[in-house]
């Protein structure tokens, strides 16, 4: 039996090294062979016995162990993927400058496989222009740098800089392993809206919709694993956003509108997968609306919201011109009717592609599967039969990739 090459898990010297133990466990449970390469400083946080016991392999940090096997070049050459978690500010800087003073940095210099970095550090270090520049350089070289999560850091501070969730990093590793050798959306800046908006009526009530956000989140996750830089504008969602996306939380259609316009300025591709409310209560009551003893019910007057997709299309001429993808939820009589409704909506919205869902056909909302029709202004419609939303996301990115300029 041919042994599959291992994945290298590089661990740099940060407190989040303890979370890499969980990442290692998840990767091993998924049947992935892992060689752990901690830096000397990482071993101050978690010792070799832990890495060796969980990976089932010896651990080395410098290039002087087992020199007859030339590990400083062999590991990088043979690895299927290298994932560095946590990647500290120092490790990112060393990787950028090509310093090779330990086994991990040597491995990074010799790796021709996909490389994923999951940074973790204090917010100031993450936001420092030196670190941000290093991240840009690594991304330009094809490294997938996952955005750190936002939240409580070591000590009392809080902000961006937490290591992304280990299960989400493992997901990104699995995605990269099953994908083409080189990520094909490198350098593409993608903005995706997902989930359902909530329109307040009073401080406790809102009008919402059944969107789970799954399709938009799968689109974000697959784009990240293909090398894109992803901003996810998330309204109400039922599933966790992927590791590596910059997540902007919004509630109402108006919040979503503001976030989309702000981030569209620098996007190459915009995907409106969110279910945006078409109507909202005309007045939001300041206090909770009480039941009346007489049994009468309150009137609910609605007003229209702005069509964000149509507005993004109109405004794109003003600055850069991102490629814009819309979604359409339709209840059609049959496939011909679905096509007609889709074509009408495409003409109305003016976007480059429209992904049409028949929401009457089967459980679309909350389901892990879906079937869609992709319409463009020129060219034949593409029918994607019922399949996991993850595969649909990949097929949609294939279509988008073929239509945007190569970079
Ligand atoms: N959309 C939007 N702003 C809105 C409503 C919808 O940007 N206020 C976007 C959705 O994100 C989706 C597309 O428009 O990408 C189509 O949404 P859909 O609900 O299918 O269509 P509507 O425009 O709401 O039209 P209708 O309800 O008449 O089918």
Image (spheres, grey):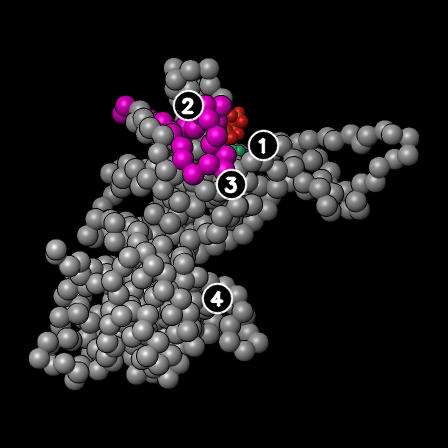
Pointer 2 residue = 342
| Quarter of the image with the N terminus in it | bottom left
According to the image, label 3 marks what residue? Answer: 212
Q: Which numbered dot is residue 278?
A: 1
Specify which label sits upstream in the sequence, 2 or 4. Answer: 4
Mark 2 in CB contact with mark 3 (< 8 angstroms)? no
Q: Do tag 2 and tag 1 residues touch (Cβ < 8 Å)?
A: no
In the picture, residue 256 is in which quadrant? top right
Whether the residue under disc 1 has CB within 8 Å of ligand 1:
yes
Q: Are marks 3 and 1 in contact (CB under 8 Å)?
A: no
The reply to whether residue 162 is visible in this rendering is yes
Placement of 265 over or under 32, stated as above or below: above
Q: Position of residue 174 (x, y in %)?
A: 30, 54
Q: Which segment did they paint magenta? A: 356-380
The spot of residue 10 in percent (x, y) is 29, 71
Q: Residue at x 27, y 25 (%)?
A: 379
For label 3, being within 8 Å of ligand 1 is answered: no
Residue 363 painted magenta: yes
SS at mark 4 in the image: strand
Question: Residue at left 17%, top 83%?
Answer: 65
- Residue 394 belongs to magenta span: no
For label 3, count other residues whose C-alpha is less than 10 Å away and answer few (under 14), some (14-19) or many (20+): many
The image position of residue 290, as x and y in percent, is 83, 40
- Residue at 37% x, 84% y is 44
Residue 30, position as x, y percentages in the image: 32, 56
Separation of disc 2 and disc 3 at Cα?
Answer: 22 Å
Of badges 1 and 4, nearer the viewer stands 4
Which of the two marks, 4 or 3, is nearer to us in this view?
A: 3
């Amino acid at each position: 039996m041919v042994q599959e090459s291992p994945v290298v898990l590089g661990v740099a010297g940060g407190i989040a090294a303890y979370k890499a133990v969980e990442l290692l466990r998840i990767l091993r449970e998924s049947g992935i062979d892992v060689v752990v390469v901690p830096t000397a400083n990482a071993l101050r946080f978690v010792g070799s016995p832990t890495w060796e016991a969980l990976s089932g392999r010896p651990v080395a940090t410098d290039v002087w162990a087992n020199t007859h096997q030339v590990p400083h070049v062999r590991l990088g050459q043979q690895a299927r993927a290298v994932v560095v978690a946590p990647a500290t500010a120092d490790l990112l800087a060393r990787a950028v400058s090509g310093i090779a003073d330990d086994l991990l940095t040597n491995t990074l210099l010799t790796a021709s496989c996909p490389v994923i970095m999951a940074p973790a550090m204090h917010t100031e270090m993450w936001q420092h222009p030196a670190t941000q520049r290093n991240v840009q350089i690594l991304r330009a070289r094809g490294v997938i740098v996952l955005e750190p999560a936002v939240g409580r850091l070591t000590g009392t501070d809080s902000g961006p800089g937490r290591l992304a969730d280990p299960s989400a990093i493992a997901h990104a590793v699995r995605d990269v392993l099953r994908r083409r050798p080189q990520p094909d959306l490198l350098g593409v800046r993608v903005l995706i809206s997902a989930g359902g908006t909530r329109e307040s009526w009073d401080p406790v009530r809102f009008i919402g919709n059944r969107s789970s956000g799954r399709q938009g989140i799968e689109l974000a996750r697959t784009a990240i694993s293909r090398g894109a830089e992803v901003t996810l504008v998330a309204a109400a969602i039922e599933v966790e956003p992927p590791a590596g996306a910059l997540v902007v939380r919004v509630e109402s259609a108006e919040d979503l509108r503001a976030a989309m316009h702000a981030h569209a300025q620098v996007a190459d591709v915009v995907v409106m997968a969110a279910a945006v409310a078409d109507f909202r209560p005309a007045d939001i009551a300041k206090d909770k609306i009480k039941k009346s003893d007489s049994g009468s019910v309150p009137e609910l007057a609605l007003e229209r919201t702005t069509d964000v997709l149509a507005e993004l299309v109109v405004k794109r001429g003003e600055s850069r011109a991102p490629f814009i993808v819309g979604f359409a939820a339709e209840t059609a009589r049959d496939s011909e009717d679905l096509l007609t409704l889709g074509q009408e909506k495409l003409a109305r919205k003016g976007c480059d592609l429209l992904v049409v869902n028949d929401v009457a056909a089967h459980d679309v909302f909350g389901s892990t599967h879906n079937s869609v029709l992709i319409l463009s202004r020129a060219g034949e419609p593409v029918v994607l039969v019922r399949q996991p939303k993850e595969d649909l996301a990949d097929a949609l990115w294939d279509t988008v990739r073929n239509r945007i300029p190569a970079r």
